[in-house]
Amino acid sequence: MSAATVPAAFEVYRFDPAHDKTPRYQRYTLDLSPHTVVLTALLRIRAEVDPSLTLRYSCRSAICGSCAMQINSKSRLACEAHVGPEMARHGRIVVEPMRNQPVLRDLVVDQTPFWQQYDRIEPHLKLDPARPMPEGKVTAMTPEEVNRFRETPRCIACAACYSACPAVEADAGFPGPMALAKLYRFVVDPRDQAHQDRLLRIQPNGLWLCLRCHLCTEACPKDVRPSERIRDLKEMAIAAEGATELGSRHAVGFKENIVDRGLLNEMRLVRQTYGTVGMLGQVGQGLKIVRKKPEIARKPARIADLEEVEKIYEALDRSPPKEEG
Ligand code: SF4
Ligand code: SF4
Ligand code: FES
């Protein structure tokens, strides 16, 4: 080991469906510069130790989106994750395939579900014949209009967000963060004649399954911020047709509770979300919760400084928080 290198301990997920009944983790130790990226280390393992190690990559420059994988339980591009910080933080580097997609072999997954969700949003411009492109121009938009979707073109379709998303894990019908970020791009594009229809269709088709955990935004190597675009879609959907889904009724009810009393009235929120008839279906679950936490059944008193809450909402309505970047 030279002074400039550190011993890096890898535990790499291995699974070959042709020979293995279950996956296993294989250990490799290499002396590497702390600046080495995980992809380079894996390629060295493949070249020098184990030619059967299977992985996907191409550009080695964080551009093609091919090398996304789980590195110490985070969805990352292997060509961007450095060995030194991973070893310093975790004492080892566990490398696994992306989540939420079936493993084909070792670190390679079948991305069909990811791309099927992308296809579902019809990711192409549907031009309005009444607003044709001006002759000789490449765009009919103002800089302000272009600025509304400045982040989404950065997406390299690496699926790191899809791998990190618990809503995808819970419900395969959820479109996923990348598809929704792309959908947002067409919803705000003034040239797209289907933008209103796209917005109305996504409300009952999974939009509200998003848990707002922001893990997709944390995982995204290109700062596309899918969770923020999903938030925008939710706000636009409510503005366009009101709260039509369980998720949107819950969101609107939550705000009404806080504006009215400064505290959440759980019983009222259940009624607002499910409606009076739908609430009957929740009685069994409700009784269990009330037995454990009886205070939930009581109507909360208004908080003393309710006008302060009102001021916060008024200020937010006047000027919504600005995003960085
Ligand atoms: S914020 Fe929504 S889309 Fe993003 S990871 Fe969480 S659940 Fe998935
Ligand atoms: S939004 Fe980000 S994480 Fe998701 S596919 Fe695009 S670049 Fe990758
Ligand atoms: S190899 Fe292209 S993004 Fe990593």
Image (cartoon, rainbow, N blue to C red):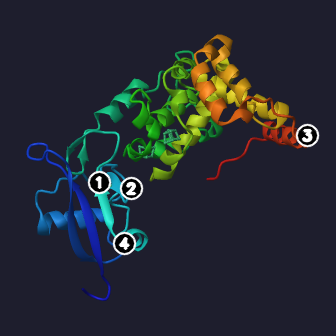
Q: Which residue in the structure is indicated by mark 3?
A: 307
Residue 123 position within the rendered picture, expressed as x and y whole percent measured from the top left: 42, 28
**Residue at point 65%, 27% (across, down):** 250
The label on residue 91 is 4
Give the amino acid at mark 4: Gly
Give the amino acid at mark 2: Ser
Mark 1 element type: strand
Between the residue at mark 2 and the residue at mark 4, the CA separation in whole angstroms equals 13 Å
Give the amino acid at mark 3: Glu
Between the residue at mark 3 and the residue at mark 4, the CA separation in whole angstroms equals 51 Å
Mark 3 element type: helix
Between the residue at mark 1 and the residue at mark 4, the CA separation in whole angstroms equals 16 Å
Tag 2 or tag 1, which sits nearer the N-term?
2
Are there few (<14), some (14-19), or many (20+) residues within 10 Å of tag 4? Answer: few
**Could you tell me if the residues under marks 1 and 2 are in contact, i.e. CB atoms within 8 Å?**
yes
Give the amino acid at mark 1: Glu
Is residue 220 depicted above or below 120 in this figure?
A: below
The label on residue 96 is 1
Is residue 286 depicted above or below 61 in this figure?
A: above
Residue 228 position within the rendered picture, expressed as x and y whole percent measured from the top left: 58, 41
The label on residue 73 is 2
Residue 62 position within the rendered picture, expressed as x and y whole percent measured from the top left: 37, 56
Tag 3 or tag 1, which sits nearer the N-term?
1
